[in-house]
Image: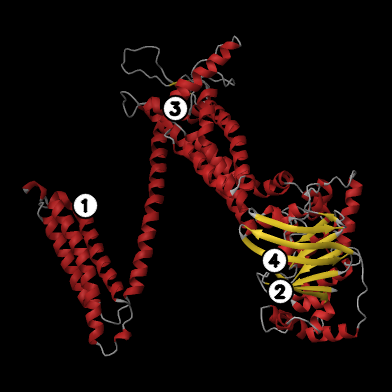
Amino acid sequence: MQHFLTPEIMTCAFLIVGVVTAFLYGRGLATSRAQLTADSAGAHSLPSYHGYFSAWTVALLAIGVIALWVTFSGALPKFMFPTMMLGAIALGFIIINRLLTPTFRARNHVERFVGDALMICSGVAVLTTFGIVLSLVFESLRFFDQVPILDFLTGLNWSPQTALREDQIGQSGSFGAVPIFAGTFMITAVAIFIAGPIGLLIAVYLSEYANKRTRATVKPLVEILAGIPTIVYGFFALLTVGPAIRNFAEGFGLSVPTQSAIAAGSVMGVMIIPFISSLSDDVINAVPQTLRDGSLALGATKSETMTKVIFPAALPGIIGAFLLAVSRAIGETMIVVMAAGRAANLTGNPFEAVTTVTVQIVSLLTGDQEFDSAKTLAAFALGLVLFVFTLVLNVIALLIVRKYRERYE
Amino acid sequence: MEAAQTNYIGSIGLKPSMGEVIEMMASAPATETTKTKFECRDVEVFYSDKRALHGINMDVPDSGVTALIGPSGCGKSTFLRVFNRMNDTIPNARVAGQILMDGQDIYSKDIDPVLLRARVGMVFQKPNPFPKSIYDNVAYGPRIHGLALRKNDLDNIVEKSLVRAGLWNEVKDRLKEPGTGLSGGQQQRLVIARAIAVSPEVILMDEPASALDPIATAKLEELIDELKEKYCILIVTHSMAQAARVSQKTAFFHLGDLVEYDDTQTIFTNPKDQRTQDYITGRTG
């Protein structure tokens, strides 16, 4: 038993017991004090709010103790931690006892606590994003100390192997990222070429033609595509689609490698179909029924209504859906690692092996690395480019979608 | 709600009040009898298993305005949508009985609902211009039906329709601007122009003024009055004053039944059924 009762576990136990007790204590205190006053209806807040207020107070003090401990733990003996916690809880109870009178505005304080807590949660997400961006930027700056940024963004040759030992030769390293960007865009283009029409037509079918029951069955089934782990797509691309395309091409006397832009892109296209179909379905459904009725009542057929009224009305939202799908495709990693290849070919032929930003980041950072070599730091620069690009796409997509929403509300 | 609106129209002197209208009609000569446009025989509409209309028998005259009135949920809008088969677009809706248009059953297999809707136009409760330019809104119907071979013809149709809908002078300088940018009353006249542009024989109106302010309503009623010379108009309305002002025939619906159908004047001055009397005097509904 002994080793379970570490100071940390004791502290946690104190914390939980303290918060729960504070809730019960505050609620009970409010009830009894309200009864003592002549007019019990005169209490400002319900007893449970006094309870919540008490629990929050103790919890905040406890969090303060934890923060203090994390900061100064080196300087203090271990048993101080639970002791400080007990002290904080005791302090909390003293404060509660002082504050909780029937006129105390516990409800308002609790509401403010709730608001603040929610704000802090969203703050965590925002700060994390900033943190990631900053680390990307600083590491990239270190990379650009060694490789000029213009060489990186416009160079046509990518071979990041630098000498591991002084005596190695012919491994100078070359960091022109254009072939990588070109490969990324080609695979993305193949994916959108496949997912765009299919996703859009699925959306049209689901929103305009399918009856309710079909829609309720088909839509979740399509969305399952988005839930399949990408590694599964990856070996599907590598072991099934790639060889199939190679065999097919061999039938025409052509030689296509198993790993090719078309194999990776088409499988990725299947993966992003639900992004396009689901989002487009939502925006098509958001087009008011009155517009459909208006068009049908003029003697338009269903498909005329679709192409001439609904589609133009939903177009901004559909573009938004496409852009989100593109940013998903650009950031996709596993499929391309397995099925696209690693050699940085600068080619316009989708039947050749190409490489992508994500694939290069994976290959730069796997294996034995020194963490301040240009080779490793190049990954950060690539990541930064990737991040900026998808960020811009997402912002544009959100702006378009928002503009579209304003139109009908 | 309706009563309040009615009184408001009356009190600001835009239109004669309900009482005045009825007095005026009592002294006016009865409308002449005309040919029949629609014959309805035992029309029933089901939503899944629920029967919304219980065997309606009613003849709609070829000219003039026929008003369908009744409390909410009485089936009047459902009945209106029978005439252009818009109920077909509602899943699980089923129509039984016979509706003859100029002697031909519009629910027979030979009738294409798409072509029927070009002959029977419809104006909805909420103005629903397409998010296109004013010109394209009006040109939509002629384009899909191939009514204009040349740009010039199309321009003519658009102008004529807008003129007839009383909107031309307000929009002739901004035909390229979006139809959704017009005011509510203008939008409603725009969709009327859109309906007129395919040269329908009948115009169905489903509470066309319910989203409009009193002034726009007055304009719309004037327009209906002009349109009735050329089109057979069926109008569903919640405002009894409106029915009295614009229609020659009125049908009172209650709980899916056609309770009473007669000259508007008779319905409002001398209703035969107690339910009609209760409704038009404001005791029910």
**Which numbered tag is attached to residue A234?**
3
SS at badge 3:
helix
Front residue of this view, candidates A176 and B282: B282
Q: Among all residues in the image, which is located at the extreme left?
A: A2
Q: Among all residues in the image, which is located at the extreme bottom?
A: A38
Q: Are marks 4 and 3 on the same chain?
A: no
Front residue of this view, candidates B31 and A126: B31
Amino acid type indicated by mark 2? Gly
Q: Nearer the viewer, mark 4 or mark 1?
A: 4
Q: Are marks 4 and 1 on the same chain?
A: no
Give the chain of mark 2. B
Residue at position x 54%, y 14% in the image: A247
SS at badge 2:
loop
Amino acid type indicated by mark 3? Gly
Q: Earlier in the sequence, mark 4 or mark 2?
A: 4
Q: Earlier in the sequence, mark 1 or mark 3?
A: 1
Above-or-below relation of A264 to A124: above
SS at badge 4:
strand
Above-or-below relation of B108 to A386: below
Kindly identify which residue carries mark 4: B54
Q: Nearer the viewer, mark 1 or mark 3?
A: 3
CA gap between label 4 and label 3 equals: 61 Å
Q: Nearer the viewer, mark 1 or mark 2?
A: 2
Residue at position x 90%, y 85% in the image: B27
CA gap between label 4 and label 2 equals: 15 Å
Q: Nearer the viewer, mark 4 or mark 2?
A: 4
Kindly identify which residue carries mark 2: B70
Q: Position of residue B253 (x, y in %)?
A: 72, 72
Give the chain of mark 4. B
